[in-house]
Image (cartoon, rainbow, N blue to C red):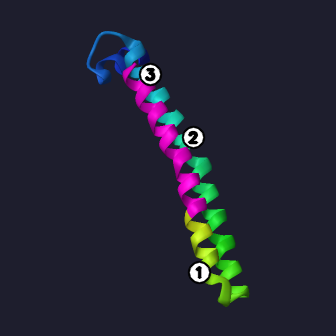
Amino acid sequence: MVLELFAQAAGGSDPTAGLSAIGAGIGYGAAAIGPGIGIGIVVGNAITAMARQPESAGMVRTTMFLGIAFTEALALIGFVVFILIKFA
């Protein structure tokens, strides 16, 4: 019954298509949790560092943006894996 509903939602008669869509969505959601937490930690620590030593704010801000970029790359990798699971 449930597999038939997933198959209808996916637009076909194959129940694994709907299940793969759900699995891919859960996988991307799990892949986005880590970078979200990481970016929060990076920004929070950068704000603390800038509040303690305002004269080094420029260097801290630059390092913070690099950390955000590297952390966000993990979310993009998760999105690519989601696309591969969904359409492969």
Residue 82 has which mark?
A: none
Quarter of the rendering containing residue 52: bottom right
Name the outermost residue toward the right.
52
Chain-order first, disc 1 or disc 3: 3
Q: Residue at x 44, y 21 (%)?
A: 19
Highlighted magenta segment, given as a residue range: 66-88
Figure quadrant of the N terminus: top left
- Neighbor class of circle 2 (other Cα within 10 Å; few <14, some 14-19, many 20+) is few
Q: Secondary structure at mark 3?
A: helix
Q: CA distance from mark 1 to mark 3?
A: 46 Å
Q: CA distance from mark 2 to mark 1?
A: 33 Å
Q: Secondary structure at mark 1?
A: helix
Q: Which residue type does callout 3 highlight?
A: Ser
Quarter of the rendering containing residue 31: top right
Mark nearest the camera among 2 and 1 is 1
- Residue receiving disc 3: 20
Q: Residue 26 appears at what percent x and percent y?
A: 51, 35
69 magenta-colored: yes
- Residue receiving disc 2: 30
Q: Residue 11 appears at what percent x and percent y?
A: 26, 19
